[in-house]
Amino acid sequence: MHYIFHDRGERETLKPLTWTRPVADLRVGILTLSEKWSLRSPGSSFSYRTESYLGGRFDLSQPEGDGVRQVRAAALATASLVDAVRALRPGQQLVDRQGEWLASHGLDAAESVVFPDAVRFIRRPYDVFSANAEALEADFDLRTAGRSSAPISATNTLLGDRIFAEPGARVEASVLNSRSGAIYLAAGSEIMEGSLVRGGLALGEGAQLKLGSKIYGATTIGPGSRVGGEVNNSVLWGNSNKGHDGFLGNAVLGEWCNLGADTNNSNLKNDYSEVKLWSYPSGRFEPTGMQFCGLVMGDHSKAGINTMFNTGTVVGVSSNVFGAGFPRNFIPDFSWGGPQGMTEYRLDKALATAERVLARRNLPLDAATTDILSEIFAQTSPLRGGTAIAQ
C-alpha cells in the first residue's frame, strides 16, 4: 500500500510548524503522523501532496494504481481507520460522521463511505500537545506489542508497568512513574541522575534528559534533543535544546530550536481567562478554547538566556529572541530582537547560523534546507512590516 498524504487546509492553520514540513511529518506522541500509518501497514510506503518548495526534502511523487490511497494527513491513524482506508474500492471516498473527507481510492472518487468512529484531527498548533497523551499511549502499544523492554538499572525507582526501554537506552538513579502515562525510551536515549519523570514520556533516539530534570506528561522529546529543568505537556520534535533550568509548559518546539538558560514560558494567564493564539490564515489572534497554552516555536528559532514568553506566544521560523521583559505574543518569521523592538533577521545571517548549528551534529547545510528557508523568508516578508504584529 502507498499512502499519499494531503495537507489540505491544515497546512495553513498549523503554521509556523508547517512552513518547513508537510502536515504528515508532524510528530505527535512517539511517531510522526505518517509513521502511524506505515507501522500499521507493514511494507507500505508514502509520499506527500504539499507545497512544491518542500520537494527537496520530502517525497512528492504521486503514483497511481490499485495499491494507492489518498489520505487526510491531519487525521490521527487508528487500526480501524487504516483498515477502512485499505478496504476502499476504486471510486470510493471515506468521510467521517460530519462528512469531512478522510481518504479516497482515486482522486475523482465520488461514492462516499461513512467511517463510524470518531476521528481526531491535528488542525492547530495547540492540538499537538493537546492530543499528545492519547497519541503517546497508542504509539506505545504499537511500538511495544509482543516485545520485552531492555533491562533498566536497579539504581532507579520504577512505578507502574508501562515503561519500555529500547536496547542502548540508559537511565540511572532516577524516578520513573508510569501510573499516569507510558514511558518510552528509544535507542541511545539517556536520562541522567536525579531526574523525576511522571509519564507519559516519549524520549526519542539519542535524546537526553539532563541532571535533575523534572518532566510531567504527556511530553515528547524528539530524536537528538537535550532537555533540562521543568517540562510539562510539551512536544519537541527533534534536535532542539532546552538544556538548562526554566519552565516549558503546554508548548510545541520545532526542529533545531534552542532555549537559553532560565528561559520560561507562561501557560496560564493571571486572570485564568481563555488564551488567544496568533493565526497565520486570519492574521489575528484567535480564541483557542483553552485555559492552558504556552509557546509555539517554528524550526531554527532561538531564545537568549532569561527570555520570558507570555501565555500563548507564537514564534515563527528562524527567529532570534532576547532581552529583558516579555516580547510580543507573535514574533514573525526571520525576526531579530525582543521587547525593545524587532528587526528583520537577514537571510544570509540566518543561513550562516543554521550552518553552524547543523555542523554541531556533523550535518551540512544542504541545498534543500537553504531553498526551504529562502522560500519561507520571501513568503513571510509582509509579516515583518510592523502592522501584522499589533495585538
Image (cartoon, rainbow, N blue to C red):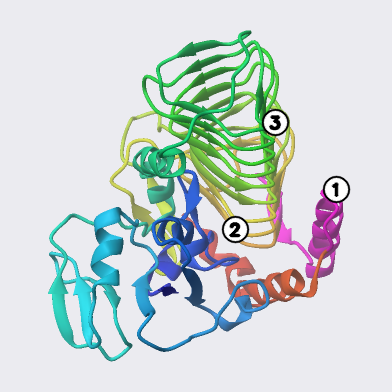
- Identify the residue under disc 2: 316
Q: Residue at x 86, y 61 (%)?
A: 352
Q: Which kind of residue does numbered mark 1 sit on?
A: Arg
Q: Where is residue 138 drawn, in percent x and y?
A: 36, 42
Q: Which mark is residue 360?
A: 1
Q: Is residue 138 left or right of residue 102?
A: right
- Amino acid carrying label 3: it is Asn
> Could you classify mark 1 by the number of other residues whose Cα lies within 10 Å: few (under 14), some (14-19), or many (20 or more)?
few
Q: Give how far across and how far down residue 305 sits, in percent.
A: 74, 33
Quickly name the residue at label 3: 306
Mark 3 is surrounded, within 10 Å at the Cα level, by few (under 14), some (14 to 19) or many (20 or more) other residues, namely some
Is disc 1 placed on a helix, strand or loop?
Answer: loop
* Residue found at x 19% / y 71%: 95
Relative horizontal placement of residue 303, taking residue 179 as reference (left or right): right
Instruction: Give the residues drawn in magenta, as a range.
Output: 336-364
Say which residue appears at 79% left-offset and 58% top-offset: 354
Q: Earlier in the sequence, mark 3 or mark 2?
A: 3
Marks 3 and 1, how far apart at CA: 23 Å
Q: Are marks 3 and 2 in contact (CB under 8 Å)?
A: no
Sequence order check, earlier mark of 2 and 1: 2
Q: Position of residue 288 (x, y in %)?
A: 33, 49
Say which of marks 2 and 1 sits in front. Answer: 1
Would residue 246 be counted in the magenta stretch? no
Quarter location, residue 52: bottom right
Vertical arrangement, residue 277 with respect to residue 15, above or below: above
Residue 356 sits inside the magenta stretch: yes
